[in-house]
Image: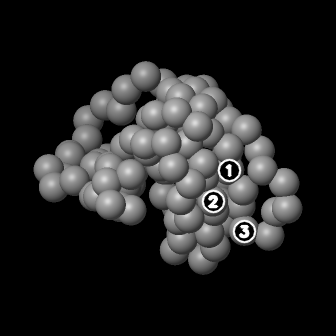
C-alpha cells in the first residue's frame, strides 16, 4: 500500500455525506481513473455502489459488511475490502477512519 497518489488532479469541492460524517475529495489520475480520498467520523453508514469499489483503509479502525454477508469483518489501517458494483456496504467507523476508495 503506497502512502501517496502521484500525478493527479483534485476536484476542489468536497463531497459531504451523512451530515458531515463522511467527507471526501475526488482525485483523477492521468489515465482518467477516479478515486475518492476521505475520512469517516465515528458512525455507522450505508453506501451504495454503482461500479465495483475497493475500500482501502489507510488509518483508523472500522468494521464493514458487504450486502449479502451476515458477518461483520474488522479492518484497520493497511487493509482493504472489495464491494461489487450495483451493491452496497455498511461501515461502522470505530474511530476516525482515513480511506481511499478505488472505483472500477
Q: Do the numbered discs 1 and 2 sit on residues whose CB atoms are within 8 Å? A: yes
Judge left or right: residue 41 versus residue 94.
left
**Residue farthest toward the right in the current orientation of the protein:** 70
Tag 2 or tag 3, which sits nearer the N-term? 3
Between the residue at mark 3 and the residue at mark 2, the CA separation in whole angstroms equals 8 Å
Mark toward the viewer: 3 or 2: 2
Q: Which residue is mark 2?
A: 90
Q: Quadrant of the N terminus?
A: top right
Q: Work out whether residue 46 or residue 68 is closer to the camera in this orientation and state it.
A: 46
x then y, percent, for residue 49 = 54, 69
Name the element at disc 2: strand
Judge left or right: residue 61 versus residue 33.
right
Q: Work out whether residue 12 or residue 34 is closer to the camera in this orientation and state it.
A: 12
Name the element at disc 1: strand
Q: Does residue 32 sit above or below 76 in this rendering?
A: below
Q: Residue at x 46, y 34 (%)?
A: 96
Name the element at disc 3: loop
Q: Does residue 84 sit above or below 24 in this rendering?
A: below
Answer whether residue 28 is visible to the viewer in this image.
Answer: no
Q: Residue at x 31, y 31 (%)?
A: 6
Numbered tag placed on residue 67 in the rendering: 3
**Residue farthest toward the top in the current orientation of the protein:** 3
Numbered tag placed on residue 64 in the rendering: 1
Tag 2 or tag 1, which sits nearer the N-term? 1
Query: Could you say which quadrant of the image residue 33 lies in?
Result: bottom left
Numbered tag placed on residue 30 in the rendering: none
Amino acid at each position: 500500500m503506497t502512502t501517496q497518489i502521484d500525478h493527479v488532479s483534485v476536484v476542489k469541492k468536497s463531497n459531504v455525506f451523512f451530515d458531515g460524517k463522511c467527507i471526501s475529495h475526488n482525485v483523477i489520475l492521468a489515465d482518467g481513473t477516479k478515486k475518492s480520498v476521505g475520512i469517516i467520523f465515528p458512525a455507522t453508514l450505508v453506501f451504495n455502489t454503482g461500479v465495483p469499489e475497493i475500500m482501502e483503509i489507510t488509518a483508523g479502525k472500522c468494521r464493514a459488511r458487504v450486502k449479502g454477508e451476515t458477518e461483520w469483518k474488522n479492518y484497520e489501517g493497511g487493509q482493504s475490502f472489495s464491494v461489487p458494483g450495483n451493491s452496497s456496504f455498511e461501515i461502522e467507523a470505530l474511530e476516525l477512519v482515513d480511506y481511499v476508495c478505488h472505483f472500477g
